[in-house]
Amino acid sequence: MSSTSSTPAVRLQQISNHIAANKTKGVDPTPNQWRQIVDVMEAKGHFTFFDCAYQGFASGDLYKDAYSVRYFVELFVAQFFSKNFGLYSERAAYGSRVVSVVLNDAKLYEEWKENLASIANQIIDMRKSDRHVLIHRPVNATSVKEKYHVYLTDNGRISIAGLNSKNVKYFTQAVDFVVRNH
């Protein structure tokens, strides 16, 4: 825009969002909240970028987890499969071949969706189990590791996918004991 123009410059800002299973915020907006987010972003002239790294992990349903994307008219979407395909340590070329084979074979695709739903349901169940013990509690990670051999990062983050119906009670009791006594 030229400096002689009387039209004010529009400042666009790019906002990054996870479509679902937002691990950094721990909460996914509801459909109504996404509509409100869209209204605010459009009113302010913002542009959105969606990171689709955890699609399928929030509900177990790929389509349902992507509802937020459907509210936006203009957007960029980056689809990552390292998480929902379990390809964390794979090189990009090999991993992309695996994803391509599965997504282009109807039988493998259905099997992958079933497996993803199973994993998501396990994560959802573990988040519900003794959840009150885990919410907003500072954890001394060293004490949990040394006393209970429960391994987590120094800032208290854990892999919910590593919990199951056989170990979640032990885990929550260990965290609860350490939080209350250290």
Image (cartoon, grey):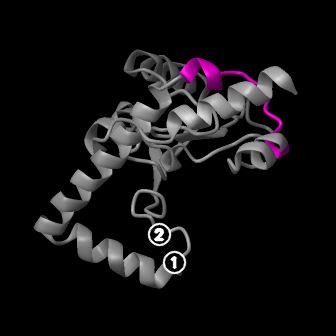
Relative depth, front residue between 142 and 170:
170
**Residue 38 placement (x, y as % from top left):** 48, 25
Given residues 63 and 47, the one toward you in this image is 63
Q: Residue furthest left?
A: 107
In the image, 78: left or right of 173? left
Q: Is residue 10 visible?
A: no
Q: Residue at x 47, y 17 (%)?
A: 33
The amino acid sitting under disc 2 is: Leu
Q: Which residues are magenta?
A: 131-142
> Quick check: marks 2 and 1 in contact, CB under 8 Å?
yes
Which residue is label 1 attached to? 90
| CA–CA distance in space, label 2 to label 1 | 5 Å
Q: Is residue 133 magenta?
A: yes
Q: Assign the N terminus to one quadrant of the image.
A: top right
- Foreground of the two, 149 or 26: 149
Residues packed near mark 1 inside 10 Å, few (<14), some (14 to 19) or many (20 plus):
few
Q: Neighbour class for label 2 at 10 Å: few (<14), some, many (≥20)?
A: some
**What residue is rendered at 58% in x and 48% in y?**
159
Name the disc covering residue 87, or none: 2
- Above or below, 33 against 146 in this view is above
Using the rendered view, name the quadrant where residue 60 is placed. Answer: top left
Residue 90: x, y in percent? 51, 78
Relative to the observer, which residue lies in front, 140 or 114?
140
